[in-house]
Amino acid sequence: MFDYFDLSRPEVDLDGLADEDIAIDVRDLSLKFGSKLALKDIRMRIPKRQITSVIGPSGCGKSTLLGCFNRLNDLTPGCEVQGEVYINERNIYHRKEDVAALRSRVGMVFQRPNPFPMSIYENLVYGLKIQGIRDRRTLDNAAEQALRDVALWKEVRDRLFDSALTLSGGQQQRLVIARAIALQPDILLLDEPTSALDPISTLTIEELITQLKEKYTVLIVTHNMQQAARVSDFTAFLHQGSLIEYSDTNRLFTRPKQQQTEEYITGRYG
């Protein structure tokens, strides 16, 4: 099914990684929305500057898990979280955690491109201005670097003050990613970032994702298993809110340890 793996590549043992190599440490995480248990006792260690994909059938808790890492789920009434999530050795669910500061360190990009109805430039510097940055040179440099990081600079440098809504869908998604990384986050969360795009734009975003790990820890939720296999270093398989298997992507897709994982990736259900 996936014949492009390098089977000679050495497998990476997540349990053997040193603490300083871990970006997110999830400890016994459970989450409820009212009486509905959405996540059950999740334990996983997500490595720094690698790409980790989360796969599983619709409704299994993929996006909910992603939303735990910047506390986006807090905005949903009835959300109750148990367990701990450590980022930079801080439990982000501690009652004294600065959630606004957390969300600047953990950027998020959603399924459909959602540029603000303002210029390309203003989209890029919006978050920096919210942080109180007003120096024009600082803003200009941050905007240019973010656009270069997503390979969009050459395409838009002559129309930075045009509406972001004039861009194509693929360009808008790259702009939204640039808007997130303009804040220089440690972690970038991508929730189905290509599901609304055409195949050519999808390929462009996938190539971008593989480049982003040079600077950022990337987590991507995807319903597309081929995409997970192509772009990610590690893959987690969720089912009904439980983490069934989590390992080196190569091994998970070629030698899954759990029968449930094998049944899902071979298309027997999901």
Image: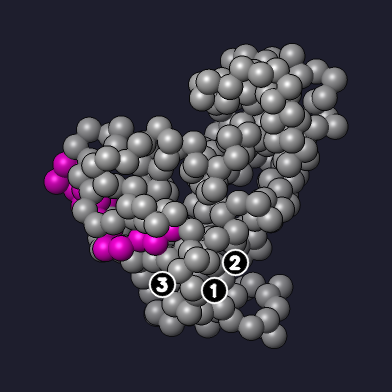
- The region drawn magenta spans 24-38
Q: Horizontal and vertical percent for residue 112? A: 55, 34
Q: Is 45 on the left or on the right of 27, as rendered?
A: right
Helix, strand or loop at mark 1:
strand
Q: Nearer the viewer, residue 222 or 127?
A: 127
**Distance CA(mark 1)–CA(mark 3):** 10 Å
Residue 28 on the magenta segment: yes
Question: Looking at the rendered structure, which numbered label has been put on residue 233?
Answer: 2
Which residue position is annotated with label 3?
245
**Distance of mark 3 from mark 2, alpha carbons?**
14 Å
Circles 2 and 1 in contact, beta carbons < 8 Å: yes
Please name the residue shown 44% across and 77% down the image: 15
Q: For the residues carrying marks 1 and 3, which lies nearer the camera in this image?
A: 1
Q: Percent from the top left, x then y, of residue 55?
A: 47, 59
> Can residue 53 be seen in this snapshot?
yes
Q: Earlier in the sequence, mark 2 or mark 1?
A: 2
Q: Is residue 150 above or below residue 233?
A: above
- Is residue 253 at least partly visible in the picture? no
Q: Residues at badges 3 and 2 in contact (C-beta under 8 Å)?
A: no
What kind of residue is marked 1?
Asp
Task: Please tell me how crowded label 3 is: few (under 14), some (14-19), or many (20+) other residues with Cα within 10 Å.
Answer: some
Secondary element at tag 2: loop
Q: Which mark is residue 248?
A: 1
Q: Main secondary structure of the magenta part?
A: strand
Residue at the spot 23% in from the left edge and 48% down from the top edge: 81
Does 172 sit left or right of 72 as displayed?
Answer: right
Quarter of the figure with residue 24 = bottom left
